[in-house]
Every structure is written in structure tokens, then in C-alpha cells.
Amino acid sequence: MRPATIVIAASIGVCNALSQKDYTQHVNLFIGTEGPVAGSAYSAGNVFPGATLPFGAAKVGIDTTRWNISFAANGGYTPDGNVTAITMLHESGTGGAPTYGLIPQMPLTTLEGVNLLDNITYMQPRTSPDEASVGYYKTQLQNGVKAEMSSSMHAGIIKYTYPSEVEGKHILVDLSHFIPSAGKKEQWYSNGELEISDGGSRYSGYGVYREGWGWGGDYRVYFCARFDTTPVEARLFSGKATDPYWPNTTDVRPVFTNATSIRGGTVGYQYADRIGALFSFPQNSSVVTSKVGISWVSEDKACQFLDEIPHWDLQKVHSAAKDQWNSEVLSKIDVHTSNQTQLEMFYTAMYHSHLMPSDRTGENPYWESEEPYYDDFYTLWDTFRTLHPLLTLIEPERQSDIVRAMIDIWRHERFMPEGRSHNHNGRVQGGSNSDNVLADAYVKGLKGINWADGYAAMKTNAEVQPYNNFDFEDPSGSTKEGRGGLQDWKKYGFVTPDRGRCLSKTVDYALNDFSLSQVARGEAPEDVAVYLNRSAGWQRTWSHNTTSLNFTGFLAPTYGNGSIKAYDPLSCGACDWQSISYEGVPWEYSWTIPFDMETLITLMGGPEMAEKRLDTMFIPGLTQSNQGGNSAGTTIFNPGNEPSFMTPFLYNYWPGKQHKSARLSHDLVDQYYNNGRSGIPGNDDAGAMSSWLVWNMVGLYPVATQPVYLILAPRFENTTVTLGNSGAVLRIQTTGLGSGPYVQSLKVNGIQWDKSWLSHEDLVRADGSDSLLEFEMGAEPVSWDSGDVAPSPGHVTIP
Ligand SMILES: *[C@@H]1O[C@H](CO)[C@@H](O)[C@H](O)[C@H]1NC(C)=O
Ligand SMILES: *[C@@H]1O[C@H](CO)[C@@H](O)[C@H](O)[C@H]1NC(C)=O
Ligand SMILES: *[C@@H]1O[C@H](CO)[C@@H](O)[C@H](O)[C@H]1NC(C)=O
Ligand SMILES: *[C@@H]1O[C@H](CO)[C@@H](O)[C@H](O)[C@H]1NC(C)=O
Ligand SMILES: *[C@@H]1O[C@H](CO)[C@@H](O)[C@H](O)[C@H]1NC(C)=O
Ligand SMILES: *[C@@H]1O[C@H](CO)[C@@H](O)[C@H](O)[C@H]1NC(C)=O
Ligand SMILES: *[C@@H]1O[C@H](CO)[C@@H](O)[C@H](O)[C@H]1NC(C)=O
Ligand SMILES: *[C@@H]1O[C@H](CO)[C@@H](O)[C@H](O)[C@H]1NC(C)=O
Ligand SMILES: *[C@@H]1O[C@H](CO)[C@@H](O)[C@H](O)[C@H]1NC(C)=O
Ligand SMILES: *[C@@H]1O[C@H](CO)[C@@H](O)[C@H](O)[C@H]1NC(C)=O
Ligand SMILES: *[C@@H]1O[C@H](CO)[C@@H](O)[C@H](O)[C@H]1NC(C)=O
Ligand SMILES: *[C@@H]1O[C@H](CO)[C@@H](O)[C@H](O)[C@H]1NC(C)=O
């Protein structure tokens, strides 16, 4: 399906001129790999810096140890650790306990002192900084081996260059390898099978793994690998099972066998033997290249995927990857600026916005379907606001496929995904945010989606209580899928403190039900009033007498009998699964009502008081909540996490105040984002933060679930946004950029504009013609936006 789409785009010549430019030169794969402390990944963006294609099924990169074991290296990479393996599967930007780091190879030059089942005995420091460019990664190990890697869609290619004078030239495959966590929710190797053939120049099999952040039980990953060189010796080994909490692995030793295949215990056994293989290459082979295909369906498919790389030339794979990133992704927004730093920030953010979810079309092990298939929605809680609306605008065909995959998951598993990885639907941090993704696609007219099923899938979220999986972190309701607090929501109109995260669930469910009302307008008009009424649930927990920092009226954790649980709107305690609100304080969550800002402003005491309160969000020093890697800065507004994403731009809901949004957009980008290794303020969250940056630099902000974009302040003189395969483009032209961040005037499609927002139709025009925004910028704030404020389409007044 994908290749056909690309051919069409090229043949009608939409981006021929653009795709000849090499945008990958502006992508810096190390942005977001370090935290505030240089050289450490603590509190980093956790992005994956290895080699992959857009939404790649294979993500080929290194896994490393870390000095500070009280956090985990979710993307595999740390700047300061030692390499323990090169593996085929990774996530990008996630927090919590890691997932993947599977199907490894590790080059060794000696077996002296090495216990093949203990990575501490063979891990390798790096003797020079790793190098990476789009589709390519290189690491230089202390043992003298240089490892270079690239990736096709489902296969990796790794080229090992060994120094000539070494004791041995080995490649270790420890099938039980995975990225460890900092303690809880550790992944686990269960069992596997491994077979060597062709004199050791091939090996294949599968590994079975379980858990990680999203739970999920055993899942199987198949692999098929080849070497370009026949080893002089290839030996299989096994060793006693170790669980993630095993106190001492030094007493677990490999036992070799002369057999050519090995199974780690009975299929499905969780305590099966760890298994692996050691390949030893001739002394005269200084370069050994390997290809590894992976599949979630079968070993045969994993072997077929090797055909994606029908040669041994890593350079060719690298340039094919570059071409694909240029044509499919980076050229979709062509920006002009002489500022190299901004180019690097922008195109790296574009790159990071296209790593997840993983396109596993044809790779679903559990059902046959004509529909596309995606996995690693990690998580929609993070990505619904900015990442999916970005895809909807520039790659609507891709976003349509993603939505179809979500609906197909509902067809087969009763619920759409939320924090799905390794084909397991959970975890759910708040609401059922698939509703928001579908509503956004619906109001923007994405094609090819079965909306009868789409709406039925949303209704499942809204009406069906998901079974309780009794997650130890919050046993009060399901964390796997759907809405764990649905019984409260239906009974009281809000979620009570009898459930974890009651306050944030209440605002999340409110937006979810607004999303249902949006789709119901076309699909089930009789439901519109029902879900709009339910979307007012947040008002039912509004405490009119709670005061904080001299402001009165806040969302409150409210019991079924109407009384309020004692709380402080500036605090969410651990801000975790059993707290009153998840990863955000009530002050922050009180702003997350994008569908009814009108009522919110009224409840906050009217426009003047509400504006003062909004100003207060950005006063340094007022935060009382430090959430480590999930927070940044000292304002109540938290630039490091998603609940606060839209807050700086809410000034567009006041007439004449857009200049405050514009100022904040520039200031926040300048303060919290840069082109350095710690240039992302916290976990990138599958590209959520990066897509937020893309929007800010382009000068628009999408109000997800509505066909509405708030106007900010563009950073570039000329921007050309390709609107999918429609043949049309959106042009954004800006004069006066040097003088300041304030919009002086704006023309939209030739018409003088006085509203601080645009509708989707202003950008993607019904007649298929190009759209044009002409900004004039300046140094002084101007109230050019005297027209209608951004809409409140979910405005409801409750008794
Ligand atoms: C990396 O390896 C070196 C040399 O073996 C060792 O001294 C160091 O402690 C290791 N560091 C980490 C973070 O594993
Ligand atoms: C180690 O990580 C913990 C968080 O897990 C953090 O609190 C601490 O500051 C880190 N230490 C260093 C030296 O980075
Ligand atoms: C390496 O070995 C240690 C100690 O045996 C283990 O905790 C860890 O999970 C292993 N893997 C990695 C990638 O560090
Ligand atoms: C780990 O096991 C080895 C071998 O049994 C033993 O020599 C060593 O003292 C043990 N280490 C610890 C920390 O228990
Ligand atoms: C494997 O084969 C070698 C060489 O033929 C032999 O010496 C050894 O005993 C065999 N090992 C096992 C475990 O059968
Ligand atoms: C290495 O030596 C073997 C055996 O002598 C020979 O067949 C092979 O061609 C040599 N390979 C290289 C890369 O020189
Ligand atoms: C380029 O952009 C960066 C990031 O916005 C900014 O800090 C820097 O001042 C700009 N450089 C010039 C010469 O304008
Ligand atoms: C609106 O929702 C509330 C809370 O769920 C419910 O009590 C009320 O009956 C609903 N009203 C209508 C008109 O549906
Ligand atoms: C709240 O009001 C009191 C009394 O007017 C004043 O002293 C205090 O500074 C105010 N606090 C804030 C955070 O504005
Ligand atoms: C309301 O319910 C809460 C929680 O069950 C209880 O602690 C509180 O005393 C009740 N308040 C009233 C007025 O009944
Ligand atoms: C605010 O009103 C609620 C509901 O009437 C009541 O339970 C609570 O005690 C009041 N709080 C304060 C601080 O007056
Ligand atoms: C931007 O576009 C305008 C209008 O098409 C053109 O005159 C100008 O040269 C362009 N600037 C750059 C840097 O491409």
C-alpha cells in the first residue's frame, strides 16, 4: 500500500522538486538523548537514535548499561554506558519501564573472562562518540570492533569491522537479552528456540518475552539471520533461567551443545533455559556483515524479509533509507531560513514525529485482515494532541491507515488501543484517547475509514466497562483498555476518589465524550445531546469555593455524595496511578477543556480573572510539583508533559490577546528546546514533544478533536506544507521575522484576517486549491485579532 502511494505522489509531480533536496543533513539523531546533566540519560528525551525507516517495524540500535541505575534507558541508548548488544526492536521517547531491546548480536574479540550469560563480563565501553545520520548508526567499541548498522522496513544490516590482531572474531547472540528497567515492571525472557544452518552462516528461531511498562504476558518475536562469512565454529548454548530480580548471575554459566538446534524448555514455559549462540569467524576475515529479519508471524516471514536487502552493501541500505525519509517525511514541510540551528531543530522534530506507532501491516500474528496494522501506540495519551493532527495534515493517507488499524483492533479485541505495544492494548493513563484520534480524523474528513465501525468502537469506550485487570499500581479499575472509571462516570457524571486519578480521568472522559458527540453529529445524531451532556462532567466537579494563590474555583476530587476530598490544587502528590490526578496538578488540568473554554472562563470568574489566572501559569517559581523526567521549569505550566501542551495558547480564546500566545510560543521554544543533546524538555513520548515543536515553529496549534488551528507565530520566512497526496500545498509566508514575535497582520487566502484561529477548510480547501497564509510580524504586541475568538463547540450549561 505504501509504495503505491509514493509512486502516485511522485508521478503527479507534487514534490519532485522538494524531494531532491536532502533534508536529512539537518537531522541530528542525538537531540533528546541526554538529560539536563551532560553525559547522562537521566531525565532525557529517551529518543531512539539508531537506524530505521518512517514508522519502521525494525529499529536497529545499541543497548547500553548506565551508571545511574535508578532510571532506565528506554530507547536502548545512554551516552555514558557500555554496549551490551545491538538489537532489532526499540521504542522512542517512552518513559516508565522499558519495552524491547530484543533479538541481539554482540561482537567479541576474546572469550577470556567472559561468561556469555553475563553481559557485565563482556560489555564494551565506546572509545569515541557514536556517529549517526538518518538510516545509519556507528559505534566504536573498546575491543576494537567498529559496528555500523542500517535498516530496511523489517530487517537490519550490521557490518562489523574487527581489528586484525585479536584473539578471536566472535558474534554472540544471547536470546535472553532485553533492556532492563530500574526495578518495577521489568521485562522478562520466557523461552525460545534457536537453530543454526549452512555451516553456521545462518540462524533463525524465535524468542518469547513478557511484560514491560504495558504488561501483557508472553509474546513471540521470530528472527532469521545470515552472515556474509561462514564461521569456523558456531555453537549453541543454554543456561539456567534467571528472573529480573536474580541476585547473582555470575553462577549461571553456558552449557554448550553440538546440536544445531536448541529449545529453551517447553513452549510457553516461563522459566525455560536462556539460550544463545556463539559464532566464531576466520582470523583472516576483518569484516563480517550480518542481516537480521524479524517477524511477529513466522520464521519464514522473517527469512523473506531478508529479501528487503538483496545484497551486502550497508551503504546502499543507508541511502535507500535516506531517500525514503526525504520523500515520505521530511520534504512534506519545506522551510526556508538561514538559521541552521532552527533547521536542525525543525527537521529533527519532524523525524522524531515519524518513529511511532510502528507499521506492522501484514505482521499481526493473531488475525488475518485486509486492514493496515500498527502497534506501539505508546501512548495515545501523549500523541493525540499534536502528533496525530500533524499526520492528518501532511500525511492524511498514513493517518487514515492508522485509524483503520485502531478500528480493526477493536473489531478483534473489543477495545481500541491506548498504550499498546507488543500487541497488547494497555496501559491506560487517563481517558480512552482513541476517541480523540478518531474524532480528529472525522472532523477533518479523512477518507477510507469505516465510520459505522469507528463510531461503534468509540461507543464501546463510552459504554462498556472494561474488566478490571487489578494492576498493582491501581487496582480500582482497568488499566488495560477503555475507561476504568466508567461506572462512576455513568452514575455520577464524574469519577470519584474511589478510583485512582479521579480528577484527571474526569477531564479526560469529558473530552472523550465530546469526541463522541463530534462523530455522532454525522453518524448518530440522536446521541449528540447525550454525549455533550456527559462531556460537561468536569463542571460537575468544579468546586466554586476552593481557593489557591488567591484564585477561586477549581476542579476538585469529588465523592458521589458531593463532598470534596481534602486536596491542594497545586499538588498531585506522587502524581501517579493512585493520585487524584496523573502527571499534572489540578491547576494544570483545570485548563484542559478545549471544547468549552466559554464555560471555563465563566467559572473562573469571567474574562479578566481568568486571564490573570492564565498569566499565573507562567510565573516562574510557583510550581510545587517536581515530577522528575516528566517535568521541566518552575512554572505551574509544565513544558515537559502533555497535559500542559495547549495552555500557553489559550489566549486565543480572548479577543485581542493572541499576542500573548505568540510571545509564549517563541519564549517557550527558546527556553526549553534547542539543537543540543538535551534539547527536548523530558521524554519525547513517541514524538509528542517533537510534534508540539513542529507546530510551534510552523506557527499553528491544532485543537485536536476540532477542525480548528490556533494561530501562533511562524519561525520561518517561507514554509510549504504538502497536504498529503491531494496535489495542494499550504504556503506560509512571513515578513518582518527579525523584528519580533508579534503578528501585526495576517491574510488568509488573500483575505485580511481578524480571527486568531483557522478552520481546517481554510488550510485544506474544498476545491483542492493551494492555501496561503501571509504574516506580517513585528516587535510590538498588536490586537489584530478583534474577530470571533476560537470556538467552544461543546458549550453546555448545566443546572
Ligand atoms: C563500563 O565498562 C568499564 C570497563 O569495563 C567499567 O569500568 C565501567 O564501570 C562500566 N560502566 C558502566 C556504566 O557499565
Ligand atoms: C539518578 O537518577 C535519579 C532518578 O531515578 C535521580 O534522582 C538522580 O539525581 C540521578 N543521579 C544522577 C547523578 O544523575
Ligand atoms: C546485563 O546484565 C545485568 C546483570 O546480570 C542485568 O541486570 C541486565 O538486565 C543485563 N542486560 C542489560 C542490557 O544490561
Ligand atoms: C555470585 O556467585 C559466584 C559464583 O557462585 C560467587 O563466587 C560470588 O561470590 C557471588 N557473588 C555474590 C555477590 O553473591
Ligand atoms: C562436541 O563435539 C566435539 C568434537 O567432536 C566433542 O569433543 C565434544 O565432546 C562434543 N560435545 C558434546 C557436548 O557432545
Ligand atoms: C581466509 O582464508 C580462507 C582459508 O584459507 C580462504 O578460503 C578465504 O578466502 C580467506 N578470506 C579472506 C577474506 O581472505
Ligand atoms: C538561530 O535560532 C536559534 C534558536 O531559535 C537562536 O537561539 C539563534 O539566536 C538564532 N540565530 C540567529 C543568528 O538568529
Ligand atoms: C446529563 O448527565 C447527567 C450526569 O451523567 C445525568 O444525571 C443527567 O440525567 C443527564 N441529562 C440528560 C438530559 O441526559
Ligand atoms: C494573595 O492576596 C494577598 C492579600 O491581598 C496578598 O498578600 C498575596 O500576595 C496574594 N498572593 C498571590 C500569590 O498573589
Ligand atoms: C461523602 O462520602 C465520603 C466518602 O465515602 C465520606 O468520607 C463523607 O463523609 C461523605 N460525606 C457526607 C456528607 O456524607
Ligand atoms: C465547599 O463546598 C463543598 C460543597 O458544598 C463543601 O463540601 C466544602 O466543605 C466547601 N469547602 C470550603 C473550603 O468551604
Ligand atoms: C519566500 O517567498 C517569497 C514569495 O514567493 C519570495 O519572494 C522569497 O524569495 C522567498 N524567500 C526565501 C528565503 O525563499
Image: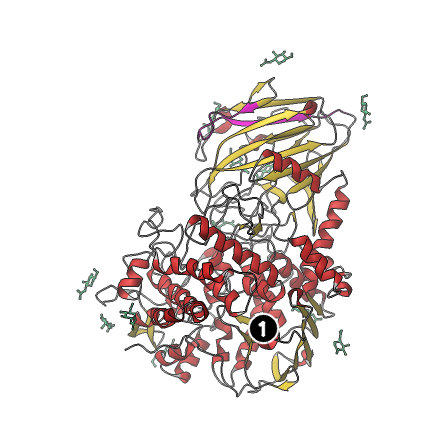
For the magenta stretch, what is the residue range? 262-283
* Quadrant of image for the C terminus: bottom left
Is 526 a magenta residue? no
Seen in the picture, residue 258 relative to 660 is either above or below; the reply is: above
The answer to whether residue 86 is left or right of residue 542 is right
| Residue at horizontal 41 percent and vertical 84 percent from the top | 608
In the rendered image, residue 790, in percent from the top left (x then y), is placed at: 49, 79
- Residue 117 in view, yes or no: no
- Residue 171 in view, yes or no: yes
Is 271 a magenta residue? yes
Quadrant containing ligand 9 reads bottom left
| Residue at horizontal 32 percent and vertical 57 percent from the top | 485
Around disc 1, counting alpha carbons within 10 Å, would you say few (fewer than 14), some (14 to 19), or many (20 or more)? many
Q: How many marks?
A: 1
In the rendered image, residue 511, in percent from the top left (x then y), is placed at: 41, 67
Residue highlighted by disc 1: 700
In the rendered image, residue 34, in percent from the top left (x then y), is placed at: 59, 53
The answer to whether residue 110 is left or right of residue 461 is right
In the rendered image, residue 645, in percent from the top left (x then y), is placed at: 50, 67
Q: Quadrant of residue 103?
A: top right
> What colour scheme governs how the chains and residues are painted in the rendered image of this protein?
secondary structure
The answer to whether residue 546 is left or right of residue 172 is left
Q: Quadrant of residue 681?
A: bottom right
Looking at mark 1, is its residue's CB closer than 8 Å to ligand 7?
no
SS under mark 1: strand
Q: Considering depth in this image, is 143 or 52 the residue closer to the camera?
A: 52
Seen in the picture, residue 297 relative to 328 is either above or below; the reply is: above
- The kind of residue on which mark 1 rests is Leu
